[in-house]
Image: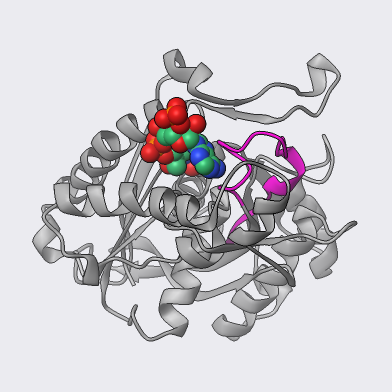
Amino acid sequence: MTLRAVVKGVGHYLPERIVPNSEFEATIDTSDAWIRSRSGIERRHFAAEGETTSMLATNAAQAALKDAGLVADDIDAIVVATSTADLTFPSAATMVQGALGMTKGFAFDVQAVCAGFVFALTNANALIVSGQAKRALVIGAETFSRIMDWEDRTTSVLFGDGAGALVLEAVESDGTTDDRGVLSTDLNSDGRYKDLLYVDGGVSTHTTGHLRMQGKEVFRHAVEKLAKTANTALEKVGLTSEDVDWIVPHQANIRIIAGTAKKMGLPMDRVVVTVQDHGNTSAASIPLALSVGKANGQIKEGDLVVTEAIGGGLAWGSVVIRW
Ligand code: UT7
């Protein structure tokens, strides 16, 4: 027998303010038609003044705990994927731990930008299968509205704020791919591509900075690398794309999502798509899509779910889950 990290609950939180594409038409040279046709985005949520990443994360965590039928003190590890933590330190994860009123366990952040949730889930899975945590909260939470250059039409229309969370629990398994839980993970990064997507500021440069992206280049890498990492993760456990019930991709651009599904030979009715409503919420996009996909009846217990994401670094990866 081995230990598996089984999904016990999922939840999400979106800030109240919804910003339709048309709102950008007043301030920059863009149009609702351009944004929809080039990215698939129709609207996104922006955090209110004073509403921070750890607040979004805490709300998502509470929703996931409720879904799991658990309370905060049942959890012994919190991993938050974010590139937009409230403060330089402490971690957003310890802020969530404090806000949840937890009196035990440990918490830390993972930073792999838009691929952050896949990296966080892989880390939490490793903690569970090695017996270091029995139950973990894995959260993706971002306030990318804080790092937008509002005069840059090539980036400012693409991103949004939000948070999603999963509760994982250690369960004994005989190790087959029919048993529930995380089946396989695949992580990659290549720092030679650091200039394709970055923030031009940070603690050691004394500014917060703004997001900069060579969109076309990132797009080109995305379709090629996402299909490859998803297929690699499936192959590791002897599965193929034919076994997949749902692809839950990072939600950056509907054309990337569709291109990756096509490369994997999967029809779009097996892909969970939320990019139209959330925009690109970076590390939050996959747990948000998992939560929405479960709530609207797409993802059911026993389904084979494949998540895949790419972002700044470049960093990319995939996780295969028997839901
Ligand atoms: O989450 C992390 C990973 N990030 C991504 O996956 C994003 C990857 N990239 C993309 O999603 C796409 O490349 C974009 C949506 C960013 C851009 O789409 P594109 O089809 O690659 O457009 P483009 O950059 O080639 O731009 C086409 C034209 C340009 O004008 P010219 O040079 O052809 O005259 C842009 O200046 O569209 C122009 N443009 C805009 N027009 C209206 C760029 N942004 C806008 C805009 N409104 N907001």
Which quarter of the picture shows residue 192? Answer: top left
Q: Please provide percent x and percent y for residue 167.
A: 54, 69
Q: Is residue 242 visible?
A: yes
Residue 150 vs 271, above or below: the answer is above
Q: 15 or 11: nearer the eye?
A: 15
Residue that sits furthest to the right in the current view: 50
Which quarter of the picture shows residue 220? Answer: top left
How was the colour assigned to the protein in this rendering?
A: one colour
Kindly identify the residue that appears in the image at 55 percent across and 49 percent down.
Answer: 283
Classify the position of the C terminus by image quarter.
bottom left
Residue span colored magenta:
137-159
Residue 183 vs 169, above or below: the answer is above
Q: Quadrant of ligand 1?
A: top left
Check if residue 115 falls in the magenta segment.
no
Kindly identify the residue that appears in the image at 37 percent across and 61 percent down.
Answer: 3
Kindly identify the residue that appears in the image at 83 percent across and 23 percent down.
Answer: 207
Q: Is residue 215 visible?
A: no
Classify the position of the N terminus by image quarter.
bottom left
Residue 245 vs 234, above or below: the answer is below
Q: 238 or 268: nearer the eye?
A: 268
Kindly identify the residue that appears in the image at 53 percent across and 57 percent down.
Answer: 32
Seen in the image, is 127 located left or right of residue 83?
left
Seen in the image, is 83 located left or right of residue 308?
right
Q: Please provide percent x and percent y for residue 28.
A: 67, 42
Q: Please provide percent x and percent y for residue 219.
A: 36, 35
Count of marks, rendered view: 0
Q: Please provide percent x and percent y for residue 13.
A: 66, 70
